[in-house]
Image: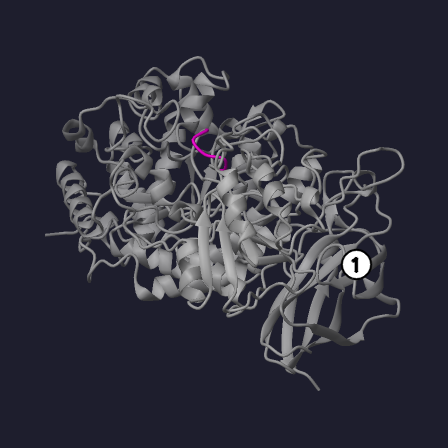
Amino acid sequence: MTTAPWRDPALPAAARVDDLLSRMTLEEKTAQLYGVWVGAATDGDGVAPLQREMTADHDWDELITRGLGQLTRSFGTAPVDPALGTQALARAQRRIAAASRFGIPAVAHEECLAGFTAWGATAYPVPLAWGAAFDPELVAEVGRHIGRDLRSVGVHQGLAPVLDVVRDPRWGRVEETIGEDPYLVGTVGAAYVRGLESAGVVATLKHFAGYASSVGARNLAPVRAGTRELADVTLPPFEMALREGGARSVMASYTETDGVPVSADPRLLDELLRGEWGFTGTVVADYFGVGFLQSQHRVAEDEAGAAHLALAAGVDVELPTLKCYGTPLVTAVRAGRVPESLVDRAARRVLLQKCELGLLDEDWRPEPDGPVDLDSARNRALARRLAEESVVLLDNPGGLLPLAPDTRIAVVGPRAADALAMLGCYSFPSHVLPHHPGVPAGIEIPTVLDALRGELPDAKVTFAEGCDVRDPDTSGFAEAVARTAEADVCVAVLGDRAGLFGRGTSGEGCDVADLRLPGVQGELLDALVATGVPVVLVLLTGRPYALGRWHGRLGAAVQAFFPGEEGGPALAGVLSGRVNPSGRLPVSVPRAPGGQPWTYLQPPLGLAGEVSSLDPTPLYPFGHGRSYTTFAWEDFTGDDVTEIGTDGAYDLSVTVRNTGDRAGAEVVQLYLHDPVASVTRPDVRLTGYRRLELSPGEARRLTFRFHADLSSFTGRTGARVVEPGALELRLGPSSAEVRHTARLRLTGPVRVVGPERVLRCEVEVAEAG
């Protein structure tokens, strides 16, 4: 029996796919361009608003006779035992393969924003905590483990990471981002992509592009960002994750920018992404994004029109389920409304990716090898390490922390005894289990209260909730104040409850009007401080909140961004001193709840000045974080003015020494200041960093290898340029503190740079001389 060319693994993938496409009917080709959400609710809104309206009814047995492009969230829709879910997915894949002429299985995709969003899977810290750790290699290792877990149950594609750069911290999805700086987002995001892809899982970059720049911080609102903001802030993390991470998929954003929805924008999805950047993978729609072209954006008159716009722009796959790319598209092609060449182009990209995944091979089998354990001891150890590294000590003015082991502690606050306080909105317990009351979390999640009691067994620990996260009831204040008055120290554990679409104070669709602590938690903190007992504020949040009201009144302040299932022990370790805090802020902490939006990437007019009575200067700047030890930065090289070409490079070095009595980690940050440019530039912006762990007395020599390409920006013509002139390279422990400065002068002509430019400042670590 002769094997068809498309089945022959010895042939190039392109030749195999060309042969396969030549044999397929129009219906079979379009079937590769959509997913099916088998478990989606059709009798209510389900997980997301508009889910019912955007989910078409279909006959599964009849549908799969044509084949199927994707299976949507077999594990992430309802609580399913992972072992049983793996068997069910394998059976579904065998049915799909057996039902169609070519026997091609579907690509199974799942969410994996902060771990595999499945019942019983490890809940890692959210991406904002990844940013706080400033440790890309650790994030890459987390990505590898998440990828292995996905593959162990038969999943091929992960819908992560989020590479949106925070522009307004009132936006509900800040917890899903890595921070407010594109270099931090790009380096950490690319690391996660490398980890996920190394496990054989297709990483999907989202949300491409501009989603976080929505007007008024409202979810799915229009974007009115200028071309330079998009080019210099929004796009670089995606470019880095593609070039350095090797991501094989991109998710088109819901966003409309300057009136053009992304899903209908060929300039972004075809000319830039595929043309300039050379991307060859698949572009998938954000859930219902193709249909939204008709129902929300109103740029298409019907489902076929929406399908035409999206296909022409470059959206290859409609997710999460078919509505536009099914019968409406087939009918439109046969009527001559949509060129069949657009279907062929998208189907070719989809099938090439399936070929890469081995789904076109004759020896393909859906049953994964080995047992299923989605919350292994190794996973939990990684989750603990990332949680510990991400905790930020904001302030400790009197050295109240670490706590004495035998002290009297009043633990107060609505986040202290709630396991869900550790988890973001895309964790399975927060994302799905609210629709399944009574179902256990499926993983062990120690609370701050329980972890602190275990951490300090000789301490006398009492507890009072005080108030709810957002309910205005203050009747619990009296007990909280009484417990505090009896204690030597109060640990006030406040913050957010993650949820979706208004069901929480942080998360998708949970946008806020200002940056006050939710509910009456601010008033509770006032009452605790008024007792005169020293108060340690512990925040478990998905965004920064304004803390100027309590500045100088607290014994200490600790910030954690939804630190995952091991976050309770991590925080307890910081409070006890077992863990030396080393996190740094990936977002600025504002002084006042107004004066937003604001990030540190401000040109001169965006900074404080005499022309306005509003001072946007943050209370704690981007990159800030304190330690229980001290560090000296010595033997800096680079004080003199140095000339290099606009295509040149420059090394600057510093020795960092731990001068304290305990091990700790310093995060050395390199910022660029461009005094004069042809367009206004941020006063400072991050261009390099290195986390450095040092024992007491230990020293290491860091060398930052700065290339002139890192000073590039979008000039007046729209091209990315490196301009001659003066530059300053500033080393500091945050964006607001400078320890050492190197002055450069770039010489030569203005240089236009493109995707081949240097994106990263490499940092060499050596023994100190």
Q: Is residue 593 above or below residue 410?
A: above
What is the x, y in percent for residue 699? Answer: 66, 81
Of residue 344 and residue 391, the one placed in the foreground of this image is 391
Q: Is residue 48 above or below residue 730?
A: above
The secondary element bearing badge 1 is classed as loop
Residue identifier under label 1: 646
As for residue 30 lying within the magenta part, the answer is no
Relative side of 753 to 583, left or right: right
Of residue 27 and residue 257, the one placed in the foreground of this image is 257
Of residue 189 and residue 465, the one placed in the foreground of this image is 465
Q: Residue furthest top?
A: 301
Relative side of 350 to 657, left or right: left
Q: In which image quadrant can residue 461 be found?
A: bottom left
What colour scheme does the image use? one colour
The magenta stretch spans which residues? 502-506
Question: Residue shown at 37%/39% (left/top)?
Answer: 431
